[in-house]
């Protein structure tokens, strides 16, 4: 049943959710990302105390690395031999290398940071920004000419790297371990402001996705996640509708209801709508929103459950992406759907052997309750095809451990039934620094989905990532569709480049790069 959307952001909910103890479910104030502004003044003219950051280029056949734009003025104002400083520290100029040289006697400048920029490509500038962000935590001001070695795409990458490399999340009584640098002055003319603004919007979306995924599940229920979506809608001018468990039941969302029914916090379906004037086509994004995954009755081992608060990363990516579309001038209509549920254990938990009827009528035999992500995604995908008739459909999910085995921890998996869509997403991943590797949507394994009692089996065995994608494909109709399995990159094991240890929010940058292009649906309509 098609439901009308309100003209203004709104929330639909008729249930009374479980009320948690506020003392146990109130996040302390979180840190904010850095702010950025441009300056044409000398870096040493900034009101102190200020850290001055300069680019260092590798030797590349020369005898020693070189210091880039802004170095001559800084050397003259501070009386420094910067090449001697590089030599003393054995600096190489590799991307992300930071050499710190204190300036104890200056009235404004407290230190000079010499930042390696490698080949000055976007990846190198993103890495340099992240390293500078980590090196300047708990400081008030950095004045930097690092990104002056590159054009707009390098500046864009540098701002994103510096922001995301500074990410912090905490729930400590004593406050965060560190604060990101408060302000960053970038050497550059005012005509570069649109580039900085776009980079800030993308970085803020990545930050939001990480924060949502990092929030512990004693706070992050499906209703809580829906409330965050409402806040994003109100801030970004989106329409928002939330299905509670009563409406989900009435309209036949059997997959979401089955997965979420054992939890004390009922499931939700979240819809966000971005509608620009003269929209050129329609994209639907679908995110897996499992706010905690015990595995259900097919219970996970304890160590595998520890990071399951982030099993809603796909949903966080969709919410964060939707919130940035207007700022980036996305030219197409975009609808975001998040199927949110907690896969819990209880007397009403769905069981191996149960048969679930999805939105639209297709049925699934549940043989493993820990293969729940595809069960909730199926409802949302079917709804998107039947009710929204999009030009393209993309789902995002931390779906299968098999993807981590296949691709390691730095690359996301991409399945697609349309070559143009697959190519567009692969290119967006490369440009944004969120690399995707296309996997085979191999129909030879289709027979594994067979069930003796239902239309499909939810856990037909290996190859696990491929059979999961084939399961989902049955709910996508004839709409060009891509499936991003980001289980391989949902968590970063350590700080590296712009990734910080913990939930990554992987997918926001790639999707925003694609959707903010001049014609995201070229070749798809």
Image (tube, rainbow, N blue to C red):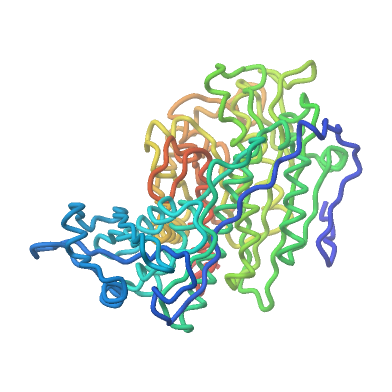
Which residue does the image show at 82% across and 40% down from the upper left?
248
Quarter location, residue 376: top right
Can see residue 419? no
Can see residue 105? yes
Q: Quadrant of the C terminus?
A: bottom right
Which residue does the image show at 43% across and 29% down from the upper left?
463
List x then y, in percent, for residue 54.
32, 66
Would you say 51 lies left or right of 264 here? left
List x then y, in percent, for residue 77.
31, 75
Q: Foreground: 458 or 500? A: 500
Would you say 409 lies left or right of 244 here? left
**As drawn, 221 above or below 129:** above
**As drawn, 290 above or below 60:** above
Q: Foreground: 296 or 247? A: 296
Would you say 358 lies left or right of 429 here? right
Which residue does the image show at 46% across and 73% down from the upper left?
46
Quarter location, residue 496: top left
């Amino acid at each position: 049943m098609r439901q009308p959307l309100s003209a203004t952001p709104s929330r639909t909910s008729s249930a009374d959710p479980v009320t948690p103890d506020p003392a146990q479910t109130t996040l302390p104030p979180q840190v904010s990302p850095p702010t950025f502004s441009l300056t044409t003044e000398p870096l040493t003219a900034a009101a102190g105390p200020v850290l001055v950051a300069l680019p260092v280029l590798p030797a590349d056949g020369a005898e020693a690395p070189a210091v880039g734009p802004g170095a001559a003025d800084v050397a003259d104002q501070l009386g420094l031999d910067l090449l001697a400083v590089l030599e003393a520290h054995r600096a190489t100029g590799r991307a992300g290398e930071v050499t710190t040289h204190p300036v104890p006697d200056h009235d404004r400048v407290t230190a000079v940071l010499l930042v390696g920029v490698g080949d000055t490509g976007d990846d190198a500038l993103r890495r340099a920004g992240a390293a500078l962000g980590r090196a300047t935590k708990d400081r008030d001001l950095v004045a930097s000419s690092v990104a002056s070695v590159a054009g707009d795409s390098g500046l864009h990458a540098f701002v994103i790297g510096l922001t995301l490399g500074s990410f912090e999340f905490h729930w400590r009584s004593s406050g965060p371990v560190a604060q990101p640098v408060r302000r960053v002055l970038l050497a550059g003319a005012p005509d570069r402001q649109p580039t900085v603004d776009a980079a800030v919007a993308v970085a803020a979306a990545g930050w939001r996705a990480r924060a949502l995924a990092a929030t512990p599940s004693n706070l992050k229920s499906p209703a809580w996640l829906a409330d965050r979506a409402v806040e994003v809608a109100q801030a970004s001018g989106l329409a928002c509708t939330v299905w509670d468990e009563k409406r989900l039941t009435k309209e036949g969302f059997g997959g979401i209801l089955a997965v979420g029914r054992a939890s004390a916090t009922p499931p939700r379906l979240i819809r966000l709508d971005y509608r620009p004037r003269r929209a050129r086509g329609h994209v639907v994004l679908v995110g897996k929103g499992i706010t905690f995954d015990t595995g259900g009755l097919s219970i996970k081992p304890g160590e595998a459950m520890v990071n399951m608060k982030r099993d809603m990363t796909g949903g966080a990516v969709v919410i964060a992406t939707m919130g940035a579309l207007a700022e980036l001038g996305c030219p197409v209509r975009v609808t975001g759907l998040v199927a949110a549920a907690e896969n819990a254990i209880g007397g009403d938990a769905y069981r191996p052997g149960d048969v679930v009827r999805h939105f639209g009528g297709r049925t699934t035999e549940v043989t493993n309750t820990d293969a729940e992500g595809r069960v909730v995604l199926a409802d949302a995908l079917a709804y998107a095809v039947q009710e929204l008739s999009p030009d393209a459909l993309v789902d995002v999910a931390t779906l299968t451990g098999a993807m981590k085995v296949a691709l390691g921890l730095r690359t996301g998996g991409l399945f697609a039934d349309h070559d143009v869509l697959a190519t567009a997403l692969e290119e967006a991943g490369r440009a944004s620094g969120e690399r995707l590797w296309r996997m085979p949507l191999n129909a030879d394994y289709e027979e594994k989905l067979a069930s003796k009692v239902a239309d499909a089996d939810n856990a037909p065995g290996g190859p696990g990532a491929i059979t999961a994608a084939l399961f989902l494909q049955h709910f996508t109709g004839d709409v060009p569709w891509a499936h991003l399995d980001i289980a391989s990159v949902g968590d970063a094991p350590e700080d590296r480049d712009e990734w910080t240890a913990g939930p990554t929010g992987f997918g926001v940058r790639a999707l925003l790069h694609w959707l903010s292009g001049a014609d995201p649906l070229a070749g798809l309509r």
